[in-house]
Amino acid sequence: MNVHEPEFRYHTLVVTVENKSGVLARVAGLFARRAFNIESLAVAPTDDEEFSRITVVVDLESAPLDQVVKQLDKLVNVVEIRELHPGHSVERELMIVTVIAEPDTRDEIVEHLDRAGGKVLSLGTDRMMLSLVGPPSRVDDFEDLLRPYGIVELQRTGRVALASLDDALD
Amino acid sequence: MATEPMDGGRALIRALEEEGVDVMFGLPGGAILPVYDPIIDSSIRHILVRHEQGAGHMAEGYAHATGRPGVAMVTSGPAATNIVTPLCDAYLDSVPMVVITGQVPYAAIGTDAFQECDTTGITQSITKHNFLVTDAQDIPRTIKEAFHIATTGRPGPVLVDIPKDIVDPTNPRSAMTWEDDVAMDLPGYRPQVDVDPEAIRAAAKLVRDAERPVLYVGGGILKARAAEALRELAELTGIGVVTTLMARGAFPDSHELCLGMPGMHGNYTAVTAMQEADLLVALGARFDDRVTGRLDGFAPDARIVHVDIDPAELGKVRRPDVAVQGDVRVAIEALVAELSDGGTGDVDRSAWKSRISGWQERFPLAYEPWVPGDALKPQYVIEQLRDATPDDTIVASGVGQHQMWASQYWTFDHPYTWINSGGLGTMGFSIPAAIGAKVAHPDRMVWAVDGDGCFQMTAQELVTATVEEIPIKVALLNNSYLGMVRQWQEMFYDERYSEVFLSKEVPDYKMWAESMGCFAMRVDDPDEVDDAIARANEVDDRPVVIDFRVAAAEKVFPMVPSGKTNSELVVPEFQQDQPR
């Protein structure tokens, strides 16, 4: 994942869809057909179980984005699309990671973890499983900090996002 | 609300009846079998095709001719894959169509069962929408939604995939309750018909100020039933009209403001007027590559007003100066009202008009005249056919040279008289499409103009036409070649002909047509043409096929070579000395 690329290469779309089978494939297929790479994608039902919300981060220039948004909007199961702008939205991502933690490095890792605001999920003799929720950039930074200790396994959720409140009042 | 216990199969047929379906095209098989039983008792006429592709194109032909959705029903697996081509064809040409496919029982889906394929997966990108129905109770609502989606907004094909168990009355999963007036549930589908008055005012201003305007008219005019409104707009403003391949007939060819067809094989005046225009008013047209030629050289000085019901078309190819989203008829009527109230402007367009009439005089559509010893000219056949048939004759064509000649040399004065495969370019389209049109309009004359390459792809549907008593007529322009490909190889591949010659001997089209129950003739000489057409026009109890043996070397002109701009239009040799 090219997590260090400048932020403007990525566009975050929040797509509200009908919660039906096959809808995710339609949305993903639309990107695939135009050879646009999906950077991350998270999907779950909204407060109304009839609908799901997809947060999709796409790597592209803004001109074709306009076309993608219009094409997405043509999908019958797509109810609403919003493009979220950095600075006007709240983005979060969850990471779960297992890292090598020998007795001599364990305190150091926990210090990093506390500073980042993460949690210890599980302890083993020579490794730890940690979790961190935060803005994607903070998750990136924490991942970089852990790398020298030896990452055994790592899973990130991809970002979820909502428009920030002041934006919503416009 | 009336309710009634029912099974899914009967409910499916009942739902189709409630949508006003009077005819459907199809072919039964294992998975769809239970739905074919209630058809026996239905008011719907079912036309049994010989290949599922035929069913799809017939449904398209029916839809093109009537504006009502065409309906086809086939079984699962190979039948579903056979109807993929018509679905894609209908998708690209925005044809309203509902296709019902059988599917293996719900519990067997995903097990590689006999005649199973992932029909909704395969057709996802070539339908406006598709459904896999998993519960018998959902059938009536889904059918209602399918017709609504197919016919509103930008029309298109919708597929409904029906597992066998939910329509089989011997299976408990087919039990359901019929309810009248079931409500649709389409929260994400809201086509916008109304237009923004602000955009109309902006468009009207550009129209008033333009010195060299052209109305660029596409198939959307026909879909929106906007031919009358278009005529009003053209006559009010005096602006010339080009009708794309999908819009032939949307504006009368005999009208003095008609400039003809633009595009790769458009006539000189239409292509050049667009190229030289300072304003293009695109009405239900999508700036297809066959119209624009090389995009960066297309209509370089033109400002663009683009009217389309599909927001994704606005700015897709060419950025409009004024975008009008909404129904094109509503938009034209609003524009007419605005221009009637605020005036059409006082720009002097006499210089532009005289340039246009100069092009029309110097570069009419024309071909080298026949001289004794020449083979029959295909263009001549079209002209004679045009002159010997009623004004409201419906012409359906296949794809290739014959399609271009038919579009060029026919005179289309009425909407919905020209049916062809524009976007997908599906060879073999004409015979089944003509059958669909003839079923819709049994009292009208329907001619399929076909090529020999196309004919061999779908000719079996003439058996359908004979058995179902659908007396279409086929003018086969037979040059023994895949003629359009041959033309490209002659012009762009140094006359190196690769795999384009079919055969002069086989098949014997007359014998083949006769074996399918048609009245058939073969014509080699120009002086036999009129007589053969006259005899064909007298036959009304069975299909007719005339095998016209035409010149193989004949090319379609004008032509914009692929990758060139429309300014580099190639005219026939005898016009090449004319000043441009």
Image (cartoon, rainbow, N blue to C red):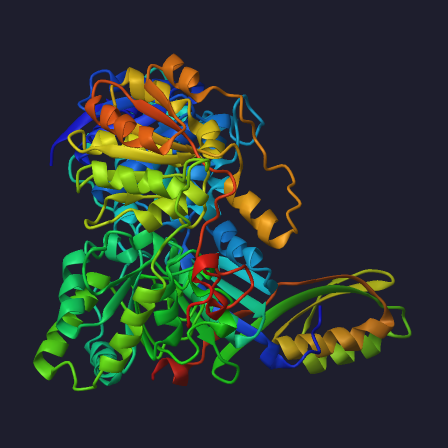
Residue lying at 65% horizontally and 40% vertically, measured from the top left:
B498
The reply, left or right, for residue A28 in relation to residue B515 is right
Image height of B296 relative to A44, above or below: below
Classify residue B469 by image quadrant.
top left
- Residue B91 appears in the rendering: yes
- Quarter of the N terminus of chain B within the rendering: top left
Instruction: Pick whichever, A146 or B194, lies toward us.
Output: B194
Residue A119: x and y in percent read: 68, 70
Q: Give the x, y percent position of residue A30.
A: 51, 56
In this view, the residue in front, B151 or A25, is B151
Horizontal and vertical percent position of residue B405: 38, 46
Identified at 44% across, 54% down, the residue is B557
The answer to which of A75 and A157 lies nearer the viewer is A75
Direction left: furthest residue: B341
**Relative height, residue B304 to residue B523 (above, below):** below
Say which quarter of the image contains residue B86: top left
Quadrant of the drawing holding the C terminus of chain B = bottom left
Which residue is pictured at 55% across the width and 23% down the height? B113
